[in-house]
Amino acid sequence: MSSSWSSTRPSRDTSSWTTTVRIENVHSILPKTTVWTNSYWDEFVSLPPVLPLGPVALLGLGAGTAAHLMLKFWPWLQLVGWEIDPLIIELSRQYFGMSDLEKPTESGGSLSVHIGDALSLSATVEGGFAGIVVDLFCDGKIIPQLQEVETWLQIAKKLMPGGRIMVNCGGADVGESLTSPWVQNPTIKALCSAFPGQLNWKRLSEKESVNYVALTGPLPDLDEWSASVPSELSTKVKQWVPCELL
Ligand SMILES: C[S@@+](CC[C@H](N)C(=O)[O-])C[C@H]1O[C@@H](n2cnc3c(N)ncnc32)[C@H](O)[C@@H]1O
């Protein structure tokens, strides 16, 4: 993902089904006829049912695809987003409905927007987050800090007891085949070392985005989890497996 816009406006896909905020790579999309993206953003909707009550951070807010989805299904959520690029926020408020997310819903949830480095010590809240969604990319690649164990230990300090982190880990290393294991993804490797015995992963299907996603903490009870998410996700949450260090 690039941190500078290639034009002064987000490009708009004029097809009937989506608005895409594009810089050099796709950052965020807003489907017009369905709320689902058929990509990794949908996975984040499954996070709230396995969290304690409390605020949820979005590190790498982008134009707010995940925020739109999460508030649609869990309108009581207190979302706290960090985005390093002020222009993305400005344009997203203007063209992508982010301003609406900043107003409280009828259930009292909302998005609070912070412009700055999501990895800074100040990107936190008193009492810690119940959940942290990490989606930090630059120039189309996951930011390199996320391949370091220490970064994950620092992020975990921002959680309240029982809190969890869900991560978009991007794709696999070049040359990897679709049947290769998680070890092909350097971010999952770092996460697995940071949280031994406390990391779960899955890889999205080819027709979605072939992204790896990771979830910290014990593997949730998959039947309970499946029953608590929107029906479109009930099969998908059953694909999570614990990560064993090879
Ligand atoms: C894949 S996009 C995020 C998409 C977003 N989660 C959504 O739902 O629309 C990655 C974002 O991470 C932001 N980013 C990269 N490094 C960052 C950092 N250190 N702190 C905050 N944001 C950062 C980029 O500017 C970019 O907007």
Image (cartoon, grey):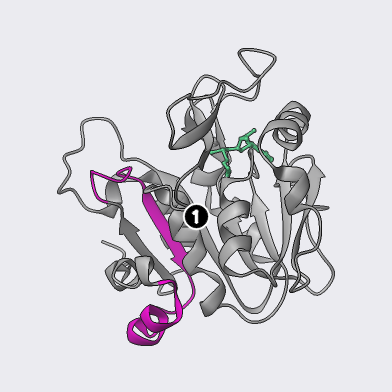
Mark 1: which secondary structure? Answer: strand
Position of the C terminus, as image quadrant, is bottom left
Give the residue at the far top of this rendering.
7
Above/below status of 90 relative to 189: above
Across and down, in percent, residue 37 comes to: 43, 47
Quarter of the rendering containing residue 12? top right
**If the picture is divided into quarters, which one holds ligand 1?**
top right
- Residue drawn at x 30%, y 44% as measured from the top left: 210
Above/below status of 11 relative to 31: above
Above/below status of 190 relative to 222: above
- Residue drawn at x 63%, y 45% as measured from the top left: 64
**Residue 26 in view (yes/no):** yes
Across and down, in percent, residue 137 comes to: 54, 36
Pick the front one: 223 or 166:
223
Across and down, in percent, residue 10 comes to: 62, 23
Which residue does the numbered mark 1 point to in the structure image? 167
68 lies left or right of 99: left
44 lies left or right of 156: left
Pick the front one: 188 or 126:
126
Queried whether the magenta region covers residue 12, the answer comes back as: no
Q: How crowded is mark 1: few (under 14 residues within 10 Å), some or many (20 or more)?
A: many
Across and down, in percent, residue 48 comes to: 56, 72
33 lies left or right of 222: right
Queried whether the magenta region covers residue 211, the answer comes back as: yes
Q: In this picture, which residue range is highlighted in magenta?
A: 205-230
As shown in the figure, which amino acid type bears the numbered disc 1? Val
- Residue drawn at x 41%, y 61% as measured from the top left: 192
52 lies left or right of 101: left
